[in-house]
Structure formats: C-alpha cells, structure tokens
Image: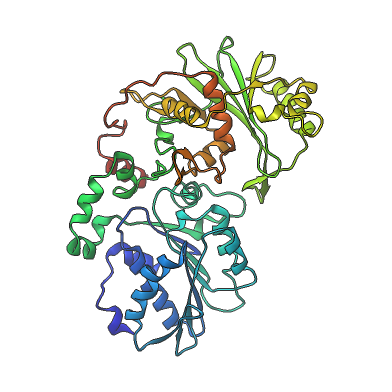
C-alpha cells in the first residue's frame, strides 16, 4: 500500500486534510487545490487502517465519478483492491470497501434511504442542494469503533455556497452544532506544486477570468457567489455600517417621510414571500423587513418548502406585522403583487382575501427579464462603492436564497425557475415599480480592503 502512495507526497494543506480528525472536514475553497487526489488518498488510508470500514464518495454525476475518482483509483489500487463495476465499489482484502454514488436530482434521494457508511466524502459539495447534503450526511452512522466523519471538498459558488460558508468559513453555528466538530482547510492552486509543475498555464487561465470568478476560483473568496445569477451580490460584514462594496448592511430606522412599499409573491407548497422596502431622498432603495413562509426543522429553514398557510392566515399575519413593526406602524404602505393573485378561478381571488384583511395591492409589472435587469442595475456599484439597493441583514431568507439562484441553461438571460426564487421574484416586482436607468459601472471596482483580493483573504483568516 505505502509503495503506491509514497510516489505522491502531500503538500502541507493536503497533509492537514489527511491528518484531520474532526467530524466534519471541509477542504479547498479555490480551483486547483489538489482536492480530488487528497480524497482518494484519504479513502485508501482509511480502508487500509480499519478492516471492514465502509467508505462512500459522492459527486453530482456518474461521469464526474468515473473521470475524477474511479479511473484514477483503478490505477492506484491495482493489485490491492478488486473493483466491482456493477456495484461501483472497490473491495479490499481486509473487508473494507469504497463505494461511489451520485446525486443529481430529487429522485436520487431514494438511494440514500436506510443505508449506512462510516465515512463519506462529498466532492464539490457546493454544487449540491443544501437538503441533498443533509440527506447524504444522514447516512454517516454505525454502531462500531470506526471513525465517523464527513469530508467536503468545495469551491465558492453553487447552490449550497451559503450553507457551506456559514458552517466552515463564518463558523456561524446554530442549535446543537458543535464548533469543535468543524474544520475548514483552505487550499489554493499555488499550493498545489504538482499541478503548477505539470500545467503552469492553469494559473494564467485563472488570472484571466472575469474579476468575480477570479476572486472565487483563484483567491478563494467566499464573499461572492461566483457563477450564480446575481454574481455581483456581495456580503461584507466589514462594511455593514459604511455601505461600501456590500449589498447587505446593518438595519437603521428609515426617515418618516420615506415611502414604504410592500412586495408580495404567493406560495403554498412553495414559500410565499413578503418584503418591505423604503426609498431615500436620493432614490436608493432598502429592503428593511420580510416575512417568508418557509418550513423550519431544528431551527433551520427547509429549502423551498412552504408552510402551506391558507391565504386568510397569510394576509392576517402580514396585517398584524404592519400594525406592530416600528418601521411600518402607522405608515401608508404601497402594495405590489404578482398579477396572478387577482385570478378568481376558484371563486374569490387572493387579492380580494387580502383586501378583506386591509392589505391592499396593485398589480406588479412581472416581466421577467426587465425585472431582473432592474435588480442588476440597482446592485451595480458606482466608483465609490455604493449601490442602489441594500438589504438589511435581518432579511435572512432573501440573503440565503439570492446567492443560490442560477442561470437558465435554455434562456441565457433568465433565471432558472427551479431554484428558490420567491424572494427574488417579489424584489423584482418592487424594482419594476421604481425603475432606474443604469449608471456606468467602473471597469473593475476595487474593494475598500485593497486592490488585491488575496489581501482580503489573508486579513480575514488571521482574525
């Protein structure tokens, strides 16, 4: 076994990954950090050290599994383990095995019901939906003395960007999450000497990416959501007070004469979303509050699962909220909603039900592409780092969902409707009620922390 592995000496970050014994271990954070090799070596070491251990490696697709893991492991394990092609499993002479599975759609959840693994590797974890990650993680169990761990390799961006960032980068733990269980090992392409020697042109490719992709893929910045529909959306706690180079800010009390808007998107099986906005004297908009009808489990939102409230309850809760909230109490509120709520096919429309609760709306302009463009226009930073739409950091479901939304592969300018887009939908309704003309953005905005995104990463990790 050792003669096969010793040919590949781990770099210091890979060595930390191989030695880590936490329950949850995340590795990577940028492209080209040597993640796949580290997964393969660690899986072999575990299988060799613990006779009878069951190891699982998961990726989104079968093609990725074959190209990134199965074929390389066939070479590494030649003569040391037998590969069962039908079961996609390497079987070791000591009874250990390494199994491969993929999870590319909701129907794949059935494969993880009732099965147990001692150690699970979820490769490119941010490309999975958050609830998929939790379903896979539930399989890590067993009444034995084997280590029970879950390894995540990951880059910034993707559907579960915010979830992975919360746990491993922000270390914002909730409920019974134990901080000692989690470790994040950052690995950049410059630390992967094998790749740098074999393909020096790869770093040139990364350096020539668009600025936001470069921050995520080369410098490993988690303050962006690279590749997502609203890739310009930034969350920088260092600037929550000065409002520069961030879209999320700390709450403040709006001035009394600023208008208040209520924007609404209906949902029953899926979440409903109600957002409140105000606009200052310069036309800058602020999302100041929200009610989001999502189901929770153990204090965490279940992605895209609605609370299934009848319309009477939805609008009653909204009215009560407006009568009590200090930003909204006593204000004349301009309501905007998807025109679909005026549909009266079932007898009485949702708009009529809302009016009975003294919650009034006017039909929104729900044109999709112009609405998304209005959001893009408002999210653009000017030369000084200020934008036209800010989000109070108390609007947690807007922040959680906006970074997960992706482009529709069949409609290049539209957003993929299978994502959790309800808060984004009602936000564009508001933006279409207050349309703006885009200003010219600087060629490459420079954040307040300096011109090099690497400075940002170094300062953050040294805290």
Q: Is residue 285 above or below residue 229?
A: above
What residue appears at the point 40 percent right and 78 percent down from the top-left corner?
Answer: 44
Q: Is residue 252 visible?
A: no
Instruction: Report the coloring of the rendering.
Output: rainbow
Left or right: residue 53 compared with residue 329: left
Q: Is residue 338 above or below residue 64?
A: above
Image x and y of residue 170, in percent: 46, 46
Image x and y of residue 400, in percent: 53, 41
Image x and y of residue 46, in percent: 43, 77
Numbered circles on residues, count: 0
Q: For the C terminus, which image quadrant?
A: top left
Who is closer to the viewer here, 25 or 101?
101
Q: Is residue 337 above or below residue 131?
A: above
Q: Residue furthest top?
A: 257
What residue appears at the point 52 percent right and 23 percent down from the top-left corner?
Answer: 431
Q: Is residue 84 visible?
A: yes
What residue appears at the point 71 percent right and 43 percent down from the top-left corner?
Answer: 307
Asked which quadrant contains residue 12, the reply is: bottom left
Who is closer to the viewer here, 20 or 193?
193
Left or right: residue 348 compared with residue 219: right
Q: For the N terminus, which image quadrant?
A: bottom left
Who is closer to the viewer here, 113 or 29?
113
Image x and y of residue 430, in percent: 56, 24
């Amino acid at each position: 076994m050792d003669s096969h592995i010793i040919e590949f000496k781990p770099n210091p970050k890979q060595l930390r990954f191989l030695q880590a014994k936490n329950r949850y271990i995340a590795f990577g954070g940028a492209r080209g950090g040597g993640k796949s090799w580290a997964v393969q070596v660690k899986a072999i070491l575990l299988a060799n050290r613990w006779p009878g251990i069951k190891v699982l490696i998961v990726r989104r697709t079968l093609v990725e599994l074959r190209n990134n893991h199965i074929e390389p492991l066939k070479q590494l394990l030649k003569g040391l383990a037998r590969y069962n092609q039908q079961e996609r499993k390497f079987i070791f002479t000591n009874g250990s095995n390494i199994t491969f599975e993929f999870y590319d759609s909701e129907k794949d959840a059935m494969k993880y019901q009732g099965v147990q693994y001692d150690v699970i590797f979820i490769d490119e974890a941010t490309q999975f939906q958050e609830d998929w990650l939790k379903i896979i993680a539930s399989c890590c169990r067993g009444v034995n003395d084997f280590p029970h761990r879950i390894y995540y390799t990951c880059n910034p961006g993707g559907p579960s960007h915010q979830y992975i960032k919360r746990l491993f980068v922000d270390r914002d733990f909730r409920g019974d999450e134990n901080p000692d269980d989690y470790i994040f090992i950052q690995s950049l392409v410059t630390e992967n000497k094998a790749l740098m020697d074999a393909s020096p042109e790869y770093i040139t490719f990364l350096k020539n990416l668009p600025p936001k992709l470069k921050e995520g893929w080369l410098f490993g910045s988690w303050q962006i959501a690279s590749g997502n529909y609203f890739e310009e959306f930034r969350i920088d706690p260092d600037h929550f007070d000065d409002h520069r180079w961030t879209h999320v800010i700390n709450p403040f009390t709006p001035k009394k004469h600023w208008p208040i808007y209520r924007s609404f998107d209906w949902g029953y099986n899926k979440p409903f979303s109600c957002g409140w906005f105000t606009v200052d004297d310069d036309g800058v908009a602020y999302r100041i509050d929200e009610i989001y009808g999502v189901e929770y489990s153990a204090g965490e939102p279940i992605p895209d699962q609605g609370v299934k409230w009848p319309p009477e309850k939805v609008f009653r809760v909204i009215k009560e909220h407006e009568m009590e909230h200090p930003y909204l109490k006593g204000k004349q509120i301009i309501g905007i909603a998807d025109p679909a709520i005026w549909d009266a096919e079932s007898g009485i429309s949702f708009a009529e039900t809302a009016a009975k609760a003294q919650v009034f709306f006017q039909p929104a302009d729900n044109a999709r592409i112009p609405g998304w463009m209005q959001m893009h226009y408002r999210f653009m930073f000017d030369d000084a780092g200020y934008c036209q739409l800010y989000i109070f950091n108390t609007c947690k479901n807007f922040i959680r969902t906006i970074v997960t939304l992706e482009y529709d592969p069949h409609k290049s300018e539209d957003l993929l409707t299978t994502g959790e887009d309800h808060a984004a939908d009602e936000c564009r309704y508001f933006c279409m009620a207050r349309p703006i003309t885009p200003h010219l953005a600087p060629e490459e905005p420079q954040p307040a922390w300096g011109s090099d995104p690497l400075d940002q990463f170094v300062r953050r990790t040294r805290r």
